[in-house]
Image (cartoon, helix red, strand yellow):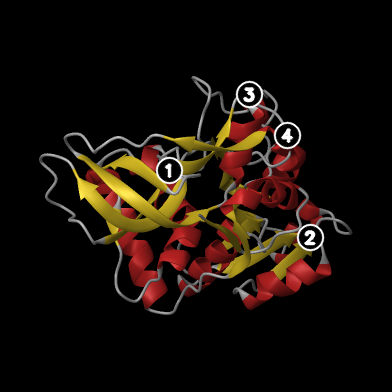
Amino acid sequence: MTQAIIINSTGGPEVFQSAEVDVADPGPGEIKLTQTAIGLNFIDVYLRTGLYPLNDFPEVIGMEGAGVVSAVGDGVTAVKVGDRVAYPMVKGAYAQERLIPDWKVAKLPEAISDETAAAMMLKGMTAHYLLHRTYRVQPGDPILVYAAAGGVGQILCQWGSAMGAIVIGCVGSEAKAELAKAAGATHTINYSTENIAEKAREITGGEGVAVAYDSIGKATFHASLDSLRPFGTYVTYGNASGPVDPFSPNILGPKGSLYVTRPTLATHTRNPEILAEGANALFDVVTSGKVKININQTYPLADVAQAHRDLEARKTTGSTILIP
């Protein structure tokens, strides 16, 4: 038996309950992981509230963590007992121990701590696919990064800047603007006091940005489209304000023959090869010092409800981890 945080229904943070759950021995191709740190992400909120449907209850949510392999099933050769590993996008993280398919974890370099790994795998591999696959950023490209003081946002700012992009960070306060600038944003837009599209065009000399990386969703959809240059790419990869409303593709032509896409990290970790590519690129950019993972909040796993409240209230910056 191990301690876990379960939910028996969707709803607010009050649905979380502490419980003892049974963790079986690992089956073929599985490992048992004793977790040392767990990442907190907005996808956890989407699962808790039912925006992303769950199949059954009781359910253990959480999509990111790190720890030590404590047992391996038949056929497992990539990792062994005692290895330090981390993973993104495998539901069931809010627990002291868990089972997980062996191909869905990455062995950690010595230079990366368990806490850093738990804070960066989901967010950092999201930043990787956004910058390198969804829209391939080129030196000199102006890019618009929403929630630039948040976990993914700060990584996008640093990594994009290292790639030679002109990073424009969109934030909700002057304090968060300073965090975005510290992370590599050349310019910032405070959506509380400035018009996003007007400011983006002013910064780019009227041309618009090459890509808008939008994790906000519904509230910023039109501002993002109006910020793009001709043939620009709108990337909606999160729904902090709710999912984007249905729209007619006909609006994209007059705005500059725009591209719209809704990628997910699940697709970009769908097999061992693509997962390893993203994880290794992330390890390289972090160990090189080009990207620093800022863990600005730490909570005991037992306080996960408060962590969710703070995340939803925009009280968090950078990455947040839970300690089981």
Question: Looking at the image, which residue is at 53% across and 22% down?
Answer: 57
Query: Where is residue 79 shown, x and y percent of the image?
Result: 18, 54
Question: Label 2, label 1: how many angstroms apart (C-alpha)?
Answer: 51 Å
Which residue is the site of mark 1?
Answer: 2
Q: Pick whichever, 111 or 256, lies toward us.
A: 111
Which amino acid lies under the numbered mark 2 shown in the image of this protein?
Answer: Lys
Going from the N terminus, do you reach mark 1 or mark 4 first? Answer: 1
Question: Label 4, label 2: how many angstroms apart (C-alpha)?
Answer: 35 Å
What is the secondary structure assignment of the residue under circle 3? loop
Q: Pick whichever, 171 or 140, lies toward us.
A: 171
Identify the image quadrant of residue 199: bottom right
Q: Which label belongs to residue 9?
A: 3
Q: Is there any visible trace of residue 236 in the rendered image?
A: no
Going from the N terminus, do you reach mark 2 or mark 3 first? Answer: 3
Left or right placement of residue 77 versus residue 134 in this view? left
Question: Looking at the image, which residue is at 59% across and 65% down?
Answer: 154
Which residue is the site of mark 2?
Answer: 199
Q: Which label belongs to residue 12?
A: 4
Q: Are marks 4 and 2 in contact (CB under 8 Å)?
A: no
